Image (cartoon, rainbow, N blue to C red):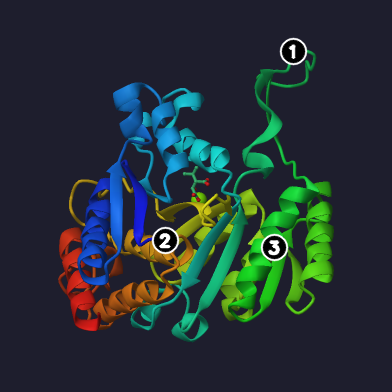
Amino acid sequence: MSDRFSLLILPGDGIGPEVMAEVRKVIAWFGKRRGLLFDVDEDLVGGAAYDAHGTPLSDATMARAQSVDAVLLGAVGGPAYDNLDFAVKPERGLLRLRKEMDLYANLRPAQCFDALADFSSLKREVVAGLDILIVRELTSGIYFGEPRGIHSDDNNPDNEGGRVGINTQRYTSGEIRRVARSAFELARKRKNRVCSMEKANVMESGILWREEVQWVHDNEYPDVELSHMYADNGAMQLVRRPSQFDVIVTDNLFGDILSDAAAMLTGSLGMLPSASLGAPMANGRPKALYEPVHGSAPDIAGQGRANPIACILSFAMALRYSFDRGEDADLLERAVEKVLADGVRTADLMAADGGTPVGTSEMGDHIVAALDQLG
Ligand code: IPM
Ligand code: MG
């Protein structure tokens, strides 16, 4: 396998371009010091693409995303786009990428760095050492199910306002089985435990989810420990005793919600990376898109205050899952850990009572300096 990879960078909106500039420093470091050469292309997504082309993702950009080894995305959205038609909202660009690249397995690790355990809204002893991985189904369920829409409800005189909004939760057994396999595979490389979450007590799609995950377990992964939990209880357990979990596998909507909750356990949303993986391409690597879990943070955009760590750690996930460079991924994660242990903090990681935060660009420089020391 060659050490030359193609990468499409889509900085997007808000703080996206700022944090991505720091990832570029890290990419350059790995090129110079570790012989990892990237052909880096950059393009528009979200509101930035709408401003330029009237669509949150042009067909040309979509085609480029399909042809590269990996896509790295910053964030999409912002108040300037709140009143756009639903079909051209920035988020539609991201959802189109996920759907057309068929990125069905969204990996959202929530790890608590020791240096940050006191920043969590939970007690240190509850979150210290926390290391869970949420595997969220990303291309189906209520995000994409048909029928959907807002319609007039003319035949129902009792409906004050006269409209009805519809979305459909729909899963096929095949869609459930493939994401379950991703979760079991990942669990085998971790603590070998999977907890599957749904609402089988009220939803038929939840019953199917539970049965199919169990089927994959019994037939293909009997060595992995599997448990099932209703998603509402799962949310409660996540804040009660998160360390009981290793891998959590769940559907698109529950995964969206549970992963935000899990992210906050670790102290800041500014820390959490993600990988969205699809089926293997001809070269054996999975279709892949990497992005921080945080959004475009319009309130601090353009101020140089954003925390670039989530985006940098997303690149670490790319090293691990797209480029087969586990050691380099470890190195980058250790560099981030070192910088945090040295007390370097962006504003989101400051205690109320003091210290001077570093800006986005300084944080990037600290991480590159730590790479120099550790690498
Ligand atoms: C996420 C985000 C997206 C989602 C939005 C931006 C469409 O919240 O990646 O978690 O709902 O999936
Ligand atoms: Mg979300």
Q: Nearer the viewer, residue 41 or 76?
A: 41
Compared to residue 288, the image places residue 164 above or below, namely: above
Q: Residue 52: give its label.
A: none
Look at the numbered discs 2 and 1 and tell me whether their residues touch, using CB distance below 8 Å: no
Residue 91 visible at all: yes
Q: Which residue does the numbered mark 2 point to in the structure image?
A: 318
Q: Quadrant of the N terminus?
A: bottom left
Compared to residue 307, the image places residue 91 above or below, namely: above
- Spot occupied by residue 53 in the image (x, y as percentages of width and height): 34, 23
Identify which amino acid the numbered label 1 is placed on.
Asp
Which numbered mark, 1 or 3, is in the foreground of this view? 3
Residue lying farthest bottom?
125
Quarter of the figure with residue 259: bottom right
Which residue occupies 64% across, 76% down?
188
Q: CA distance from mark 2 to mark 1?
A: 51 Å
Q: Is mark 3 within 8 Å of ligand 1?
A: no
- Spot occupied by residue 348 in the image (x, y as percentages of width and height): 29, 64
- Helix, strand or loop under label 1: loop
Residue lying farthest front?
1
225 vs 254, left or right, is right
301 vs 263, left or right, is left
Q: Nearer the viewer, residue 302 or 273?
A: 273
Q: Is mark 2 within 8 Å of ligand 1?
A: no
Instruction: Give the mark, 2 or 1, whose residue is nearer the N terminus.
Output: 1
**Label 3 neighbourhood size at 10 Å, few (<14), some (14-19), many (20+)?**
some
Q: Which residue does the numbered mark 1 point to in the structure image?
A: 154
Which residue occupies 38% across, 71% down?
329
Which numbered mark, 2 or 1, is in the foreground of this view? 2
Identify which amino acid the numbered label 3 is placed on.
Arg
